[in-house]
């Protein structure tokens, strides 16, 4: 009985406290909040402002933190140049000319040279990595994967997730994909100038080439006619003509028909495929053959992402020799 009375007293006290707290909220609070919300919706969304517009912005600290975040040693002046685009230089010159300065002196240079050098390094390192990691893949299909890994959208995605968007010095805002991709190229060149070729190659390998992880390389090849491509491949290597043969069928002349086709070359079975008709099954069998010939089967060994510059050095020299011969 005593415990019951104590419980009732505690509940009565808690109810009294909650009633007191509710009485502390004045009647004008809710209408005021509704009016503020109505005015905010009437004005529309707030304009997106650059991070540099905040009062706690420290550009030198951001440049220093960027290199430490990536665990790379950049020369501060070179890294700052990598983030400085030509549009920012032109904008600053116009501002100084507007206040009467005839020969503006900014003390920084734009990153056009770094962008050109970084683009060359990225193409060179990615191609060498693919030639080493996928040695049986023909050159034309290596180029397809290389183009996908170094596309503007892919470079911009990587650059944005590295935190470059808030540090880029450009006249345009918000920063578009073109600026993000070109900035990443300039950063690669800045790293090469600051830390050498080995660190630059590892940077490209770790942030660009690793996008192949747990991806099917066959998706990058964009082969529309697999059987025709297989025939061209065998013809270039002076192999026998691939011959599709029907090796099995189930449910013929029904809606659930399934055909199995095998492709033979020199009386050897290269691959098999299945489909609702023989044409589709032949194309699937040709894709299976191409996977085996190119060394990119579904059960292939994972791509080795521990390759270093010394491992791919021979591939870099051979690709440079081929390009030099084409230009000559």
Image: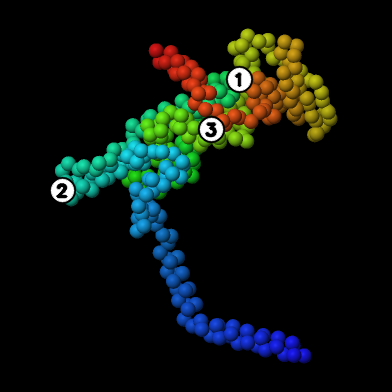
Residue 171 percent location from the top left of the image: 32, 46
Crowding near pointer 1: few (<14 within 10 Å), some, many (20+)? Answer: some
Measured Cα–Cα span from mark 1 to mark 2: 64 Å
Measured Cα–Cα span from mark 3 to mark 1: 18 Å
Residue 314 percent location from the top left of the image: 50, 19
Is residue 244 visible in the rendered structure shown here? no
Q: Earlier in the sequence, mark 3 or mark 2?
A: 2
Q: In the depicted view, which residue is nearer to us: 121 or 220?
A: 121
Tell me the mark number nearer the camera, choosing from 3 and 2.
3
Asked if labels 2 and 3 touch by Cβ distance under 8 angstroms, the answer is no
Element carrying mark 1: loop
Which residue position is annotated with label 2? 100
Crowding near pointer 3: few (<14 within 10 Å), some, many (20+)? Answer: many
Element carrying mark 2: loop
Which residue position is annotated with label 1? 136
Apparent side of residue 40 relative to residue 60 in the rendered image (left or right): right
Q: Which mark is residue 209?
A: 3
Apparent side of residue 276 relative to residue 185 in the rendered image (left or right): right
Q: Quadrant of residue 188?
A: top left
Q: What residue is shown at x 74% (from left), y 29% (from top)?
A: 275
Image quadrant holding the N terminus, namely: bottom right
């Amino acid at each position: 009985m005593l415990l019951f009375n104590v419980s009732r007293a505690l509940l009565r006290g808690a109810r009294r406290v909650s009633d007191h707290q509710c009485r502390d909220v004045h009647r004008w609070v809710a209408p005021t909040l509704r009016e503020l919300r109505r005015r905010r919706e009437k004005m529309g969304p707030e304009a997106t402002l650059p991070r540099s517009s905040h009062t706690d912005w420290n550009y030198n600290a951001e440049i220093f933190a960027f290199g430490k975040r990536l665990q790379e040693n950049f020369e501060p002046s070179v890294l700052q140049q990598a983030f400085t685009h030509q549009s920012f230089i032109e904008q600053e010159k116009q501002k100084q000319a507007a206040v009467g300065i005839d020969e503006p002196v900014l003390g920084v240079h734009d990153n056009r040279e770094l962008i050109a050098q970084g683009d060359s390094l990225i193409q060179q390192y990615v191609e060498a990595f693919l030639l080493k990691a996928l040695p049986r893949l023909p050159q034309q299909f290596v180029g397809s994967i290389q183009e996908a890994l170094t596309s503007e959208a892919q470079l911009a995605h990587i650059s944005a997730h590295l935190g470059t968007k808030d540090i880029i010095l450009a006249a345009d805002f918000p920063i578009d994909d073109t600026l993000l991709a070109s900035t990443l190229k300039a950063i690669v060149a800045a790293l090469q100038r600051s830390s050498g070729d080995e660190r630059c190659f590892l940077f490209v390998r770790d942030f660009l080439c690793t996008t192949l992880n747990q991806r099917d390389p066959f998706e990058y090849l964009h082969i529309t006619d697999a059987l025709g491509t297989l025939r061209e491949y065998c013809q270039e290597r002076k192999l026998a003509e691939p011959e599709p043969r029907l090796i099995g069928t189930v449910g013929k002349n029904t809606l659930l028909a399934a055909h199995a086709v095998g492709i033979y070359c020199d009386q050897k079975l290269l691959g098999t495929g299945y489909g609702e008709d023989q044409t589709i099954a032949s194309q699937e069998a040709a894709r299976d053959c191409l996977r085996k010939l190119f060394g990119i089967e579904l059960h292939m060994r994972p791509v080795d992402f521990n390759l270093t510059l010394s491992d791919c050095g021979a591939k870099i020299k051979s690709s440079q020799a081929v390009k030099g011969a084409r230009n000559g």
